[in-house]
Image (tube, coloured by chain):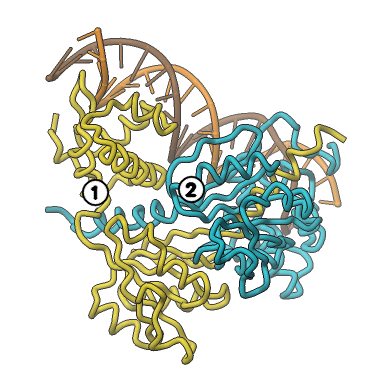
Chain colours: A cyan, B yellow, C orange, D brown
Amino acid sequence: MNPQNKRKPSNEQVSELTTNRLSVYLRCLNQLESAGVNTISSQALAEQFHLNAAQIRKDLAYFGEFGVRGVGYYVKELKRHLRQILGLDRKVRVAVMGAGNLGLALADYPGFRREGFEIVAMFDVADAKIGDESRSGVPIFDLKELKKIVKRDRIDIAVIAVPAESAQPVLEQVVAAGIKAVLNFSPGTLKQPKGVKLKSVDLTVSLESLSFYLAQGIDPEE
Amino acid sequence: MNPQNKRKPSNEQVSELTTNRLSVYLRCLNQLESAGVNTISSQALAEQFHLNAAQIRKDLAYFGEFGVRGVGYYVKELKRHLRQILGLDRKVRVAVMGAGNLGLALADYPGFRREGFEIVAMFDVADAKIGDESRSGVPIFDLKELKKIVKRDRIDIAVIAVPAESAQPVLEQVVAAGIKAVLNFSPGTLKQPKGVKLKSVDLTVSLESLSFYLAQGIDPEE
DNA sequence: TTTTGTGAACTAGTTCACAGCT
DNA sequence: AGCTGTGAACTAGTTCACAAAA
C-alpha cells in the first residue's frame, strides 16, 4: 500500500535477528551483482545461499515493497535499499579500543573496509604504543584523547578489544565521549548503558559451546 | 527425582542459547569463587550479573538437580558440574586455520587458554609463514599436513580465520581430517557439513547491525 | 522461611499457504 | 504463470507463579 516509505514504524522494535539477516542478504546481493545477475526471486536467493524464502520476503517487506510480483527483486535496486536501511549509504567511522593483538587484527580486518566502514583510530594506554600505527596505517592515540578525537573525526562506532578487567571502564569512557554503538570483544558481562547499542561477541562462550557439542555428541549412551 | 544423572535425554536437542548461557554461568561462578563466595541463589546470581533467575534455574535443572532448596547452589559444586557438562573437565585441543593477522591474534588470545583450551597448531599455505610460530609459540604448519597433525595431536576444534574465498575449501579439508566442531570467522555462508557443529562469528554482520541501529535510531522523524 | 524445580502462560520468531498483483 | 506480501498456524524461548523440599 504505502509504497516504499514504509520505514520502521518508529516505536516498534526490529529484532536483531532480522537486522543480522539484512546484512547477510546484502552480501548475497553483492555476489549476485558481481556475477551479473539482474533479478532474483526469494526462492532462488534462498536456495543459492541456504536461507528461507518466506523469511526473506517477510524481512524485506517489513521495510517496504521492494519486489515485483511475477519477477522477484531487482538486484541493484534491492542492494541500494538494503544499504540505505543499514546506514551504509554514508561512511561509517569506527574506532578500536585497545591496540593489543586482537585490536590490531580488527583494525586491519579487510572485511570491515569493504562495506563502507572506515577504521579511523585506535586507543591504548601503553606509552610504547601511542603514536605508533597499525600495519595498514591506523594511528594509535592515547586513551585520554578519546573525547577529542571522537569529536574531531566524528566517530560513530567503538570496537572494544581490551583485557576483560578494563572493558567496563573503557565502555563508560566510550559512552561518555558520545558514542552510541559499541561492539565488544571482551569476555564477561557489561552493564548495558541506556541509549547505547551494545553488541558483544564472546569468543570463549563460542568455543565452549562447541566443546559442549563434542562432550554431549560423542557417546551414544553409557 | 532422577538425582543428577539426568543428562541430556539423548535425542532431544539443547538450544544453543542455553549452552551459551551455561558458559556465561560458569564464568560468573569463577568470579564468585575467586571472591570467596560459597553459596549463591539463582536470585542473587541474576542480580549480580544482570541475568534472569527463572532462566538460570531452568537451564540448570535441565541437566540435573544441582541446587538445594532454601539455600541455593554451592559455587564449587555447580562449577564442577558445568565444567563437566561443557566438556571442560579435560583439555580441549584447538587448531587455527590461517596465520594472518586475525589467526595469529586468535591463537594468542588469552581468554581461550584460561578455561581449558589449548591452541596447539596453526595452518597456512604461505611458505613464508610455515615453520614459524605465533608470539606465544603456537607452531605454523603447512595446510597439507593437516590430517597428519590432527591425528597426532588429537585436535578437537578448528577455528577458521582464512580469507572469505578459502573458507569453504578449508572447511571441507578440516571436516575430511575428522574434526567435528568448527568456529568460523570468515564472512559468508558456508555449507553446513552434517555430523559437524559449525558456529560462525561474522564480524561484518555485527558491525552492520550496529550501523542499522544508528541509521534508524537517530532521526526522531523526518 | 527460603529457594529450588517446573507446569502453565506468555512472548518472540519462523514457516505455511494463499490472495492478489504483474 | 510466477512471485510477492501477509495473515494465520506453528514452533521455540522466556517468564511467571507456586507446590514441594530443606
**Mark pair 2, 1: CA separation:** 26 Å
Instruction: Determine the image quadrant of residue B122.
Output: bottom left
**Residue B145 higher or lower than B84, as above or below:** below
Q: Residue at x 34, y 44 (%)?
A: B27
* Residue denoted by label 2: A166
Picture coordinates of residue B161, whole percent (x, y): 49, 71
Q: Residue at x 44, y 49 (%)?
A: A164
> Is residue B123 toward the left or the right of residue C15 in the image?
left
Q: Are marks 2 and 1 in contact (CB under 8 Å)?
A: no
Dot 2 crowding, Cα within 10 Å, few <14, some 14–19, many 20+: few
Label 2 chain ID = A
**Residue B77 higher or lower than B52, as above or below:** below
Say whether mark 1 and mark 2 are on the same chain. no
Picture coordinates of residue A7, whole percent (x, y): 78, 39
Instruction: Determine the image quadrant of residue B46.
Output: top left
Q: Residue at x 73, y 38 (%)?
A: B217
* Residue denoted by label 1: B83
- Three-letter residue code for mark 1: Arg
Q: Quadrant of the N terminus of chain B?
A: top left
Label 1 chain ID = B
Mark 2 element type: helix
Q: Residue at x 70, y 41 (%)?
A: A178
Viewer-nearest of labels 2 and 1? 2
Mark 1 element type: helix
> Is residue B42 toward the left or the right of residue A138 in the image?
left
Q: Is residue B32 visible?
A: yes
- Three-letter residue code for mark 2: Ser
Picture coordinates of residue B186, whole percent (x, y): 53, 67
